[in-house]
Image (spheres, rainbow, N blue to C red):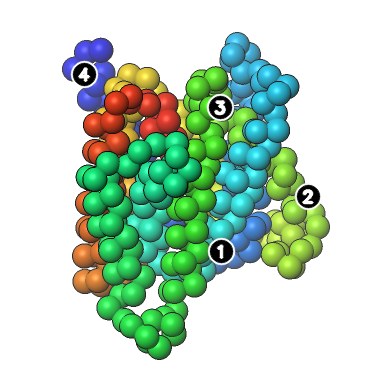
Amino acid sequence: MTLSSNRFMYAALLSVSCLWGASFAAAKIGIAELAPLNLVVLRFVIAASVFAGILAARREKTTLKRADVPRFVVLGFLTVTSYFYIQYTALTFTTTVNAALLVATAPVWTAAMAAAMGAERVPLLGAAGIAVALGGVALIISGGRAGADLLSSATLPGDLMVLVNAVTWAGITLYGKSILQRYPPFTAMAWIHIFGTALLLPFAFVATPLAPVPLSGQIGGITWPTVASAVYLALLCSVYAYFVWYLGVERLGAVRTAAFSYFNPLFAAIVGVLLMGEKLSVYVAAGGTIVLAGVYVTNRAKERGAVPQARNQAWRKG
């Protein structure tokens, strides 16, 4: 691969980090007018339609084995149907900066979960990284508060929900390992979007406690900023971002590609502060720095393991 093509790939991956970092702000714009569940439905109906078109155009290596369909259904439910509903609901309570930083802890929870299941051994360096990251999480969520002040914090419910998001992604990562070993990653993500969206479709027409007015009842009155946020999330954060991400894994390797995920919270903070008017407190800034340091140490410990797992490290979100 030539130096110029490497530079192009680096620029493309940096654009993905920017898009994923800004995705929290885009979701905030969408949920200002739509119920969180309805924004999820709208985003993934658009994304799944494009993914289906790409699979139909490519044809080769895009079909699924019948035995794998149940696993794709579960992954679709976890990755699309539930994960983003939790995330968008959380954003009604917390800031985009907090959300981005807490979601960034997913690799730490993946390592801890893998160790608890006996799937991987966590070395001392990895354990130290997990401990450091958790310290940063505590600082972000507490914001320097304790006791009754912490419990009355307006962002606490959202922060805890985003933390559930990160733990959920860790479970998705471990559960999806075998799928990524049998299918091209982009193809797998396309099918996961399609199955997850199929599970969402009934909610577009049926009122539930999660969305008393379904998307079909809101769609006629939504404004252009909401439409733009859904299109941004669907086409740029799902289709384009996953295509570029897995192209980066193929051309640069999983480790170098994964390094770009450290830019996500930075872009989220820039967009949150400059465009959304959010305040970046000293505690959140310090906690975020500690979280990213802990995630970095944990990932470095995994990279020093006996068998690098390129495709497993490539499992991303946004």
Numbered mark located on residue 89 in the image? 1
Q: Earlier in the sequence, mark 3 or mark 1?
A: 1
Amino acid bearing label 4: Ser
In the displayed structure image, the side of residue 111 where residue 126 appears, left or right: left
Mark 1 vs mark 4, CA separation in Å: 42 Å
The mark closer to the camera, 3 or 2, is 3
Going 24% across and 51% down the picture, which residue do you hit? 128
Q: Earlier in the sequence, mark 1 or mark 4?
A: 4
In the displayed structure image, the side of residue 219 where residue 13 appears, left or right: left
Numbered mark located on residue 179 in the image? 3
Mark 3 vs mark 1, CA separation in Å: 29 Å
In the displayed structure image, the side of residue 253 where residue 318 appears, left or right: right
The mark closer to the camera, 3 or 4, is 3
Amino acid bearing label 3: Ile
Amino acid bearing label 2: Pro
Mark 3 vs mark 4, CA separation in Å: 33 Å
The mark closer to the camera, 4 or 2, is 2
Going 19% across and 17% down the picture, which residue do you hit? 3
Neighbor class of circle 2 (other Cα within 10 Å; few <14, some 14-19, many 20+) is: few
Numbered mark located on residue 4 in the image? 4
Q: Earlier in the sequence, mark 3 or mark 4?
A: 4
Residue, far right = 206
Amino acid bearing label 1: Thr
Going 38% across and 33% down the picture, which residue do you hit? 313
